[in-house]
């Protein structure tokens, strides 16, 4: 079932939902340069497990509008609020992959966690840039020089970027159809817009916010992540009051695409509590 949400600045977002209307609600938030189609291997399966699954394309991505303003994670968090208000969502579990995790943290910082019962974040360090006191940022974009290099590639050689991004984020090969889909979805974005959004995302430091968050989190990290060192992504769990970190040993940044069955089972158990005791003491899959 498709839906449209008009944000408070007029931007139109495109989304879909599946699963029972009165099931526990889970909202899937894709990462930078992705789209809701990145959850192709997850949405229907989670819906079949009795969850109401809502997913949408962030502005600048997929089939949503691409205005020439608002290239900030905080604007994406405001968009999430608009989606939740217009679909009348509460008591939800938010699932954010990569930059989608930052959207969750930004939402909580701006609007609180009253309407969120739990959250799942996937392979995102609390800060991408490297600083004197932080060396576990992104492997590819971590300072002014590497950001400029990325922005140049996005502006001048976007199709090569899309292929290289796939190669960086996948260790367990996807089917040819799925590989083509995720690359094609990236190419729906505008390279220069992605460059401006990354300039905001890469310098945001969530380390001081994370210890203040009360709701339970599940932190899924890729043991073979091409984007972050394990020390960076695991730090999220160490900084939070109530957070379980699970490492997908063989998988990369797109672990939910690479090992969807494992991911869907873990997330659905975290959301519903059913079978969650089986994951006690489990730190890697």
Image (cartoon, rainbow, N blue to C red):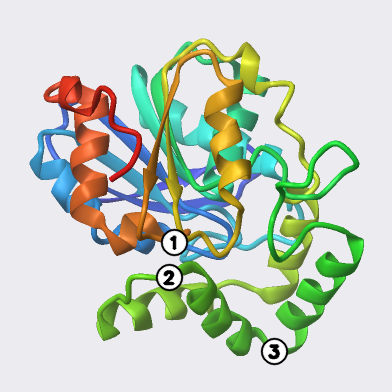
Judging by the rendered image, the residue that carries numbered circle 3 is 157
Residue 239 x %, y %: 61, 22
| Residue 229: % across, % down | 61, 52
Is disc 3 placed on a helix, strand or loop? loop
Residue drawn at 25 percent across, 79 percent down: 175
Q: Is 81 or 237 nearer to us in this picture?
A: 237
Task: Decide if residue 185 is on the left or right side of residue 9.
Answer: left
Quadrant where the image shows the C terminus: top left
**x 68%, y 43%: residue:** 73
Q: Earlier in the sequence, mark 3 or mark 1?
A: 3
Q: Nearer the viewer, residue 86 or 96?
A: 96
Residue pictured at 46% horizontal, 36% vertical = 83
The residue pinned by badge 1 equals: 252
Q: Is residue 104 left or right of residue 172?
A: right
Q: Which residue is mark 2?
A: 170
Q: Nearer the viewer, residue 274 or 235?
A: 235
Residue 184, quarter of the rendered image: bottom left
Which of the two discs, 3 and 2, labels the residue nearer the N terminus? 3
């Amino acid at each position: 079932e498709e839906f449209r949400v008009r944000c408070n600045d007029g931007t139109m977002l495109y989304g879909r939902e599946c699963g029972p209307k009165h099931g526990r609600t889970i909202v899937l938030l894709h990462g930078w340069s992705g789209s809701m189609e990145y959850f192709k291997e997850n949405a229907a399966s989670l819906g079949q497990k009795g969850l109401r699954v809502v997913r949408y394309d962030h502005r600048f991505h997929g089939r949503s509008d691409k205005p020439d303003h608002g290239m900030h994670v905080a604007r994406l968090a405001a968009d999430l609020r608009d989606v939740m208000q217009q679909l009348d969502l509460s008591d939800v579990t938010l699932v954010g992959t990569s930059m989608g995790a930052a959207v969750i943290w930004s939402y909580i910082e701006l609007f609180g966690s009253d309407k969120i019962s739990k959250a799942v974040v996937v392979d995102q360090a609390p800060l991408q840039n490297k600083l004197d006191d932080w060396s576990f940022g992104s492997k590819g974009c971590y300072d002014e020089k590497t950001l400029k290099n990325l922005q140049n590639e996005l502006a001048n050689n976007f199709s090569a970027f899309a292929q290289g991004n796939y190669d960086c984020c996948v260790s367990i090969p996807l089917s040819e159809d799925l590989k083509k889909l995720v690359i094609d979805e990236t190419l729906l974005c505008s390279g220069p817009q992605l460059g401006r959004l990354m300039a905001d995302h890469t310098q945001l430091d969530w380390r001081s916010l994370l210890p203040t968050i009360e709701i339970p989190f599940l932190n899924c990290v890729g043991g073979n992540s091409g984007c972050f060192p394990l020390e960076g992504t695991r730090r999220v769990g160490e900084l939070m009051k109530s957070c379980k970190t699970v490492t997908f040993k063989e998988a990369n940044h797109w672990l939910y695409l690479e090992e969807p069955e494992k991911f869907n089972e873990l997330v659905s158990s975290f959301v519903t509590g059913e079978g969650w005791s089986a994951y006690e003491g489990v730190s890697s899959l």
